[in-house]
Image (tube, grey):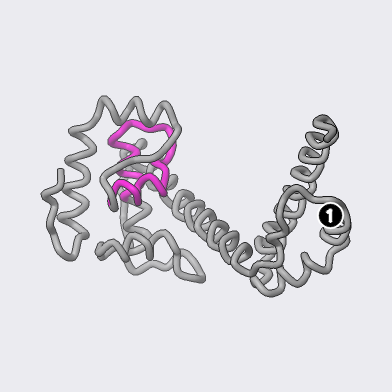
Amino acid sequence: MNIFKEKGNFKEDKKNHNEIMKYAIKLLKEEKSVEEAREILLGSQLYKEWKSKRKVFGDGFKDKRLYEDLKSQIDIEKSCKELEAIAKEFLLALERKEDVVINSEKKHFQKYNLITQLVRDLDYDIQEEELAYELAKLSFQLELDSIFPVLSFISLLNENTICNNNDTINKNLSSKQDTLLNYLREFEQKYKKNKIFDHL
């Protein structure tokens, strides 16, 4: 066996595999349905050329679940960006010490926001604009320059843990534990349907 040849095959196949994956993501971001994206990709010249060559990676592009998983990731990413955009406006107002008016009935998105629904599924009675404000409020209290990561916020509500690789946020959190705990208590008192805040 030629080790160098095998290594070359792996690198080339990985590159081609990644290109096809990017194409699948592009199709889904263009609002193609799971079925449409799968059909277009499998009929593409890019896929056919890759399929005709010796492959190291398995051919998972025929599996509908791949496209469903990718679509879920895209939808979550989009929902995070939607909320962050509104939260940034609130954060700016807080930094300027301006009055903040929250309209819990206001609908910012044509479709429901997935992140808001995830928080509601955790037994919180909260609307889109309220959640955006709370993200801004937490960011302001922790003295962050940007919005507290949305998925880390959900993890915090769900498991009382934070998963992020931002050194600035980690540093602020370590020095503001009391601020964070007080915020979480207030958040639960305000929005939790069944208030059982005894895990902190």
Does residue 153 show up magenta in the picture?
yes
Q: Which residue is located at x 37 percent, y 62 percent?
A: 118
Q: Nearer the viewer, residue 176 or 88?
A: 176
Tell me the amino acid under the disc marked 1.
Answer: Trp
Image-based side of 15 in relation to 167, left or right: right
Q: Which residue is mark 1?
A: 50
Instruction: Look at the magenta stretch and give its main secondary structure.
Output: helix
Q: Position of residue 55 (x, y in %)?
A: 79, 50
How many numbered discs? 1
Q: Position of residue 17 (x, y in %)?
A: 75, 50
Does residue 105 show up magenta in the picture?
no
Image-based side of 19 in relation to 192, left or right: right
* Quadrant of the image containing the N terminus: top right
Q: Nearer the viewer, residue 129 or 69?
A: 69
Q: Which residue is located at x 19 percent, y 40 percent?
A: 181
Q: Position of residue 54 (x, y in %)?
A: 84, 51
Q: Nearer the viewer, residue 17 or 4?
A: 4
Q: Residues within 10 Å of mark 1 (few under 14, many from 20)?
A: some
Q: Nearer the viewer, residue 171 or 99?
A: 171
Image-based side of 150 in relation to 159, left or right: right
For the view shown, which residue lies furthest in the front direction? Answer: 1
Q: Which residue is located at x 85 percent, y 34 percent?
A: 5
Of helix, strand and loop, which one carries label 1?
A: helix
* Quadrant of the image containing the C terminus: top left
Q: Which residues are magenta?
A: 134-157
Q: Which residue is located at x 24 percent, y 29 percent?
A: 176
Q: Position of residue 128 (x, y in %)?
A: 38, 61
Image-based side of 70 in relation to 15, left or right: left
